[in-house]
Amino acid sequence: MNKSVEKFRITARQVIDIVLLVVLLIFIVQNLGSTEVKFLFFKFSMPLIVLIILVFLIGLLTSRAFSRKKTPAKEESVEKSVEKPAEKQ
C-alpha cells in the first residue's frame, strides 16, 4: 500500500503548476468578451484573451530575436579581460 501512495506523491512544483493553471483558467473565463481592435487601416473584433496571447507571443519572439547569446570566443575574451595583470619583476 505504501508503494501506491509514493507513486502519487505531489511535489511543491506540481502544486504551484496546478494553482497557476487554475488562475489561468479563471483569467480566460473572465476575458472571453470580444473587443474591437484598430490597427492602421484595419478594424476587427476578437476575444480579449486571444489579443493578450497574441501580444505576448509577439513580445516573446521579439525578445528572442534581439537577445544576444554568448559564443565561446566571447566568453574567452571576457575571461582574459577579467584576469589579473601579470606582476612586474
Image: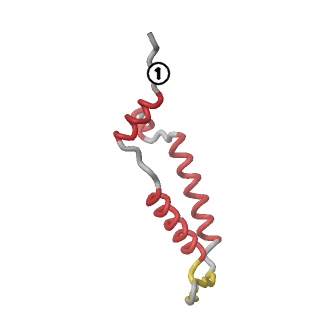
Residue at which label 1 appears: 85
Q: Quadrant of residue 77?
A: top left
Q: Looking at this rendering, what residue extends furthest in the left direction? A: 72
Residue 6 position (above or below residue 85) = below
**Label 1's element?**
loop
Q: Is residue 38 left or right of residue 1?
A: right
Q: Nearer the viewer, residue 32 or 74?
A: 74
Q: Quadrant of residue 56?
A: bottom right
Residue 65 in percent (x, y) is at: 44, 60
Which amino acid is tagged 1?
A: Pro
Q: Residue at x 56, y 82 (%)?
A: 46
Q: Nearer the viewer, residue 56 or 28?
A: 56
Residue 2 position (above or below residue 74) = above
Which coloring applies here? secondary structure
Residue 62 in percent (x, y) is at: 48, 63
- Neighbourhood count class around disc 1 (C-alpha, 10 Å): few under 14, some 14–19, many 20 upward: few
Q: Nearer the viewer, residue 9 or 13?
A: 13
